[in-house]
Image (tube, rainbow, N blue to C red):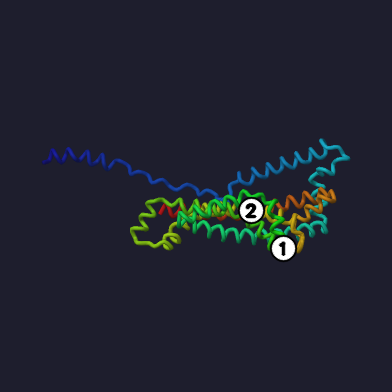
Amino acid sequence: MTAATAGTAPAAQNVAAVPEAATPSPGPRKFRWPFAIAPIRVIAPVLVFVLVMAAWSLASHVLIPAESRFLLPPPESVVSKGLLNAATRTEILTALWSTVQIALVGLAIAIVAGVGFAVVMSQAKWAEYSLYPYAVILQTIPVLAVVPLFGFWFGYEFSSRVIVCVMVSLFPVITNTLFGLKSVQPAEHDLFTLHGAGRWQRLLKLQLPAALPAMISGFKISAGMAVIGSIVADFFFRQGDPGIGRMIDVYRQRLATEELLTALLLSSLVGLILFWIFDFLAGRVDRAHGKRAGE
């Protein structure tokens, strides 16, 4: 008994002598940029912008003769005549606001209609087989060929311009939403079937939440296309408030290149802002989906 006890004592001492595993202390918290914007996402576009401005200035001052410089005026001339001139700035911003209103209305209608069509097609194969080919046809129709017809049928004012926006921005919403609704895993459908979920319960609580990332990706694409559609409509439908497309055509006729480039750059900025808004929403949705998947 004593020998056994003596034999186990050193072992016990050895066990006791083993130090406890040190708990790793949390390191210093890393700085998080607002809205999850990494420095590279800011620095890289700024560098590209600087390079483009430098190349533009070089081409205007060095490569183009002075007598032809009106074809590509330097950036400082565009800023001074297009942005710093109060009358020109007011004219461009007023026209741009009219275009933005039409683009937003057309985008909203395209989102509602596109999601609605996609939901219908996701619930019945016969609906998908019946409707989807016409969505593809709508996307492949040359817009410039049918814009005059819209003027004959609906007039040359606000409604026709909105219809053009809806036409060019509808297809990405339909395809991305339909893809998202159909991307639900069969196991998840089986789980809802096991709990006796109905069609609408399955749609609202399973398919639509799962489709949100794909839907917002479609909205991002359609946002830029709605701006393009609104500008294209401005070229044809000149009644009502003039849009930025009409002003671009006026500047083209006057050979006012500085004002023309200002209108083009501000139009691009509107599309970029809309893209950023939906990109921000997409990031929030992706993070929410990641948290749910980790629960």
- Amino acid beneath label 2: Val
Foreground residue among 67 and 295? 67
Residue with the mark numbered 1: 155
Where is residue 173? Give x, y as percent: 56, 54
Residue at the (72%, 63%) spot, across then down: 155
Q: Say whether residue 258 is left or right of residue 282.
A: right
| Kind of residue at disc 1 | Gly
x%, y% of residue 126?
47, 55
Q: Residue at x 67, y 51 (%)?
A: 143
The 10 Å Cα crowd at callout 1, few under 14, some 14 to 19, many 20 or more, is some
Q: Are marks 2 and 1 in contact (CB under 8 Å)?
A: no
Query: Which is nearer the eye, 67 or 180?
Result: 180
Picture quadrant of residue 270: bottom right
Q: Is any atom of residue 14 visible in this view? A: yes
133 over 17 or under it: above or below: below
The image shows residue 211 at horizontal and vertical percentages of 49, 54
Q: Which mark is residue 259?
A: none
Instruction: Please name the residue that numbered disc 2 is placed on.
Output: 168
